Image: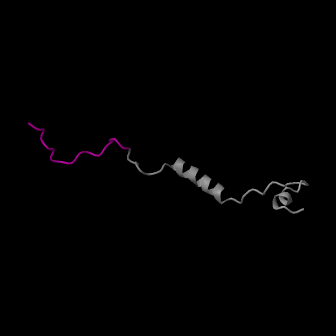
Amino acid sequence: MSAPTPAEPAPHGPGLQPPAFGRPSPALIARADRGYTRFLAAPAPDAATGDHDQDNDAAGTR
């Protein structure tokens, strides 16, 4: 014998998944926004080689 089928749909309430399942949290969006801002920022200047002529040695010219 099986249980009777309810006449109305199941009530909406807390279930296995939270109501915002699949939507990013505001904290996650803020973190991604900061990372994207850092990505778009101007790159840091190259380190100065000083008087060592490292760039010239690598090219084979002095």
What is the chief secondary structure element of the magenta stretch? loop
Left or right of 55 on screen, residue 19:
left
Is 7 inside the magenta-drawn segment?
yes
From the viewer's side, name the closer residue of 61 and 33.
61
**Residue sitting nearer the eye, 32 or 60:** 60
Residue depicted at 64% across the width and 57% down the height: 39
Question: Left of 52 or right of it: where is 26?
Answer: left
Residue 10 pos. (x, y %): 23, 45
The residue lying furthest to the front in this view is 60
Residue numbers of the magenta segment: 1-17
36 within the magenta span = no
Q: Position of residue 40 (x, y in %)?
A: 65, 60
Residue placed furthest toward the top = 1
Residue 50 is situated, as x and y percent measured from the top left of the image, at: 89, 54
* Residue drawn at the location 85% of the way across and 60% of the way down: 56
Quarter of the figure with the N terminus = top left
Quarter of the figure with the C terminus: bottom right
Does residue 43 lie above or below 3 as drawn?
Answer: below
